[in-house]
Amino acid sequence: MALNSGHSLVEKFFFVRQWARHPLQFGAILPSSSTLCAALAQYVPTDEYVVELGAGTGNLTRALLDQGVPPERLIAVEIDEKCCALLRKKFPHLTVIQGDARHLCSLLPPDIVGHVGTIVSCLPFLNFSPSVRRAIVQACTHVLVSVGQIFLLTYSPISPIPSKAYGFSKKCLKFVFSNVPPASIWRYQLDPS
Ligand SMILES: C[S@@+](CC[C@H](N)C(=O)[O-])C[C@H]1O[C@@H](n2cnc3c(N)ncnc32)[C@H](O)[C@@H]1O
């Protein structure tokens, strides 16, 4: 079995090198597999603004575009400068923003804040302190529409983010055992009431 196929060997090497430099920030030694990315992308609507957090080397970005999310409605946010350069090269028509997801409100163009339908996160939440997790979830709630949703990839069998406190109902949608390591897909839906 190819380990998390979907990337070229050069990109896998690039990812491993970045992980070795910033292990906590990357959270995984390999990029997510195409199977995992496609499994998540199928849930994502194609008629609204979608923000991807922690786009890395773009495997999930590719799956979202393949699923039909228009590039002009997809915004990739990534903290790592080298990953951003790679993403801009791979997806020249995409908006790639370098920055910390905690500052999402000020990173996104002002006319999009409050109009994002879906946020997709590959952030390594398990490696973040509770205060960083809270800051990121809070920033997400500010940019989402009132019935917005977050999809999250995680290696944790339990929900890695506080949901009730922010008015989300949560559901684990899928386990993908073939990913290395096995991962689950969670959905957090804002309750408009
Ligand atoms: C597990 S990798 C996921 C990469 C890719 N999306 C995938 O699925 O293969 C996590 C990514 O989140 C990025 N990241 C970590 N903390 C971040 C933060 N606070 N804001 C934005 N990106 C962050 C890392 O630089 C890394 O590229």
Image (tube, rainbow, N blue to C red):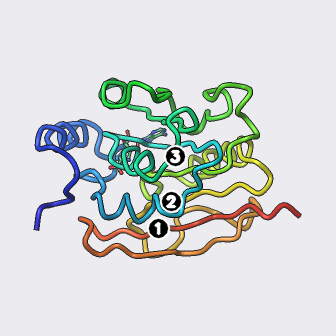
Is 8 left, or right, of 121 in this rendering?
A: left
Instruction: Kindly report the distance in space between the C-alpha atoms of the residues bearing marks 3 and 2.
Output: 17 Å
Q: Mark 3 or mark 2, which is nearer to you?
A: 3
* Cβ atoms under marks 3 and 1 closer than 8 Å: no
- In the rendered image, the vertical position of residue 155 relative to residue 101, given as above or below: below
Residue drawn at x 44%, y 52% is 122
Would residue 103 be found to the left or right of residue 78 on screen? right
**Residue assigned mark 1:** 185
Mark nearer the N terminus (3 vs 1): 3
Where in the figure is residue 98, as x and y percent of width and height?
47, 26
Q: What residue type is labelled 3?
A: Val
Where is residue 6 drawn, in percent x and y?
22, 52
Pointer 1: residues within 10 angstroms few (<14), some, or many (20+)? Answer: many
Which amino acid does the dot numbered 1 rest on? Ile
Q: Which mark is in front, 3 or 1?
A: 3
> From mark 3 to mark 1, how far is it between C-alphas?
19 Å
- Residue shown at 72% from the left, 25% from the top: 110
Structural crowding at the residue carrying mark 3, measured as other residues with C-alpha within 10 Å and reported as few (<14), some (14–19) or many (≥20): many
| Disc 2: CA contacts within 10 A as few (<14), some (14-19) or many (>=20) | many
Q: Distance between the residues labelled 2 and 1?
A: 6 Å
Q: Name the residue under label 2.
A: 152
Marks 2 & 1, CB-CB < 8 Å contact: yes
Ligand 1 within 8 A of label 1's CB? no
- Find disc 3 in the rendering and name its residue: 69
Q: Look at the image and tell me in which quarter the N terminus lies.
A: bottom left
Report helix, strand or loop for mark 3: loop
Amino acid type at image mark 2: Leu
Q: Position of residue 76 (x, y in %)?
A: 48, 36
In the picture, measured across the screen, residue 191 lies left or right of residue 105, that is right
- The foreground one among 135 and 35 is 35
As drawn, 84 above or below 129: above
The residue located at (47%, 67%) in the rendering is 185
